[in-house]
Image: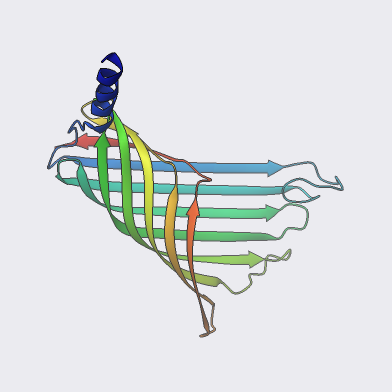
């Protein structure tokens, strides 16, 4: 009897949903990632992550998002991102630059398993124009490589609503279908690439303010 009671109690805990995100609530926030690498060990034969000459790498990724709760524990959102990347070879003077931005819409579903904690899933569609350019050691620029990426993705994760007005999120995986169109500056020829991918390599943390 005790075993049966424990079993049904666990089933109740794992299946009961506490409605914490109410209709008409609004969430605004997102995430910011900054990566800075500077290598100074020039002249080492085996090199480091960039080789045997001193290098610098800077990545800045900003991801703002606004979500509106349309029904209990279900929200629709608009989001964007901006990525700036620079890799400079301080030994030769050459460098490459990459910039991109993203706009998209999404649907988010929340499932509470305790008063404050639960699982979430994001279904998103986004479009990302970007370009990359290489500069040789004289500073002369090469033609830009231009890209347009359209993505449909599903991202599961966790959330913790620790107060009435604040929640934290962590996306832990991503399954996506990507359609990429690429071309070189001043050349009309385009290349097309389609792929389906599933990744677990990155965890993306976010913070959101909640208001009515």
Looking at the image, which residue sits at the far front?
A: 1
Residue 114 seen in this snapshot: no
Return the residue nearer the eye: 154 or 182.
154
**Can residue 5 be seen at all in this image of the molecule?**
yes
- Residue sitting at the far top: 2
Residue at screen point 84% across, 47% down: 46
Q: Residue at x 38, y 41 (%)?
A: 157
Q: Which residue is at the front of the view, 62 or 182?
A: 182
Is 187 left, or right, of 40 in this rendering? left
Q: Foreground residue, 70 or 148?
A: 70
> Quarter holding the C terminus?
top left
> Quadrant of the rendered structure where residue 126 is?
bottom left
- Image coordinates for residue 181, horizontal then vertical, percent: 47, 74
Whether residue 9 is situated above or below residue 168 in the rendered picture: above
Vertical relation: 211 (above or below) 62:
above
Question: Compared with residue 97, is residue 173 higher up or lower down, i.e. above or below?
Answer: above
Residue positioned 20% across, 45% down in the render: 74
Q: Is residue 62 left or right of residue 93?
A: left
Q: Position of residue 63 (x, y in %)?
A: 39, 48
Q: Quadrant of residue 98?
A: bottom right
Task: Report the label total.
Answer: 0
Query: Residue 65: image x %, image y %?
Result: 31, 47
Asked which colour scheme the image uses, the reply is rainbow
Q: Quadrant of residue 119?
A: top left
The quarter of the rendered structure image containing the N terminus is top left
The image position of residue 164, as x and y in percent, is 20, 27
């Amino acid at each position: 009897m005790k075993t049966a009671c424990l079993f049904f109690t666990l089933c109740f805990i794992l299946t009961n949903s506490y409605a914490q995100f109410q209709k008409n609530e609004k969430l605004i926030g997102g995430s910011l990632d900054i990566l800075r690498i500077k290598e100074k060990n020039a002249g080492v034969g085996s090199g480091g992550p960039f080789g045997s000459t001193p290098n610098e790498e800077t990545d800045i990724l900003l991801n703002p998002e606004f979500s509106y709760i349309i029904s209990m524990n279900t929200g629709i959102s608009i989001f964007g991102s901006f990525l700036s990347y620079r890799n400079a070879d301080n030994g030769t003077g050459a460098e490459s630059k990459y910039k991109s931005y993203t706009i998209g819409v999404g649907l988010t579903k929340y499932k509470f398993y305790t008063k404050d904690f639960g699982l979430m899933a994001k279904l998103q569609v986004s479009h990302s124009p970007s370009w990359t350019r290489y500069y040789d050691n004289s500073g002369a620029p090469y033609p830009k490589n231009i890209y347009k990426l359209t993505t449909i993705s599903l991202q599961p994760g966790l959330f913790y609503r620790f107060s009435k007005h604040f929640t934290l999120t962590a996306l832990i995986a991503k399954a996506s279908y990507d359609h990429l169109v690429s071309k070189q500056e001043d050349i009309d020829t385009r290349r097309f690439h389609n792929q389906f991918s599933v990744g677990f390599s990155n965890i993306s943390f976010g913070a959101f303010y909640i208001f009515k």
